[in-house]
Image (cartoon, grey):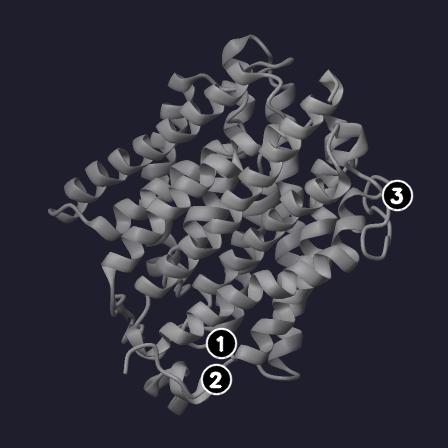
Amino acid sequence: MDLTGLTTGLNTFWVLMTGALVFFMQAGFALVEAGFTRSKNTTNILFKNLMDFCIGTIVFWAIGYGIMFGAGNGFFGKFELFSKTDHGAALGIPNMAFFFFQLVFAATAATIVSGAMAERTKFTSYLIYSAIISTFIYPISGHWIWGGGWLAQMGMHDFAGSTVVHSVGGWLALTGAFVLGPRIGKYKNGKINAIPGHSITLGTLGVFILWIGWFGFNPGSTLSLSNPELVANIFVTTNGAAAAGAIATLIVTWLRYGKPGLGMTLNGVLAGLVAITAGCDTVTPGGAIIIGAGAGIIVVFAVELFDRIFKIDDPVGAVSVHAINGAFGTIMVGLFAKGDGISGLFYGGGTSLLVTQIIGVAAVAAWTIACGLVLFYALKHTVGLRVSKKEEENGLDYYEHGEKAYN
């Protein structure tokens, strides 16, 4: 084998193995969502996470991949049925390797939504909106940034998807939870009635799995092992932000509530991971810790804001973790970017990158929220979005699936 063949082989192996790590994040999301909700809905939550990936595999392959990476215009790629155009050649890897890596990212965006809408959503409606997200909503905004679209042309930097993946899932989760309404008994007489999840053990295991998976999510986005120093730096910035997010959340919750809370601190880990994803390739380890700590602080107050002020019932904190900190992390690139041809405000780059990042965050938020409202209201007034009061009170496992997770 010649040197070119060896390089292609190594890079292909790297992309596929890191893609497999990102796929393993589906298990992490499943356990977090199951643990943070009640036992009577466990089968339902696990089933939704399974079908996200299964449905996403088919529809993203059939339509979404071409829309995202096709050579259309600045706003829309092309309809390329079952990815017959080679989008991997220019990257030095086979098209199917690039497709698989992008598929697991698309599935991640769809999975984020299920946690915020947990314990009261019809399974049929969930299957429909999961398909639409992976077919159109995610690929179109993804094309703007990763497919050479108008935001890419402006110079927006979102290396591994704080906005492309996480904010898209987070904003859709917000609209879904808003249209769906809170769970029965969540708000009584203007007061919040906490509804604890059934297994902090499952939730903790899920977060550790997600943390491991992020070492595929961020480093794998290099799509190559040609720059080992860059890959190593991404591992360090990703890990540092997660740790700093957890510590910051721990401190804030301890001071604010009088006791350190594990549930919120787990979300601090995820907030740090989400926030660093946009700039993991271009910020320093020190900058990553600052970004992660900021995310860990923000997630506490974001959860309170949506719960107490807006009365948005989000059982797992998906909106605060993914939408808010996805936006925060993307904007922070405009401040902390250093090297790789771009510089943020703190490193002499001026405000141009910061402004571009803000425009990108706002544009994707507007697109996703608008699509989400149309989609969820359409489902609400056609096939129905919410289960009956009886089904919700007794649990979706029995009524929707006829099988309970715990017998």
Residue density around tag 2, few if under 14, some if 14–19, many if 20 or more, within 10 Å = many
Q: Earlier in the sequence, mark 3 or mark 2?
A: 3
Q: Is residue 180 left or right of residue 260?
A: right
Q: Earlier in the sequence, mark 3 or mark 1?
A: 3
Numbered disc 3: secondary structure: loop
- Disc 2, disc 1: CB below 8 Å? yes
The residue drawn where x is 59% and y is 47% is 105
Residue density around tag 1, few if under 14, some if 14–19, many if 20 or more, within 10 Å = many
Residue 45 position within the rendered picture, expressed as x and y whole percent measured from the top left: 43, 70
Which quarter shows the C terminus? bottom left
The residue that label 1 is drawn on is: 121
Which dot marks residue 72? 3
Q: Is residue 334 left or right of residue 11?
A: left
The residue that label 2 is drawn on is: 387
Amino acid on which the number 2 mark rests in the picture: Val
Numbered disc 2: secondary structure: loop
Note whether residue 122 is visible.
yes
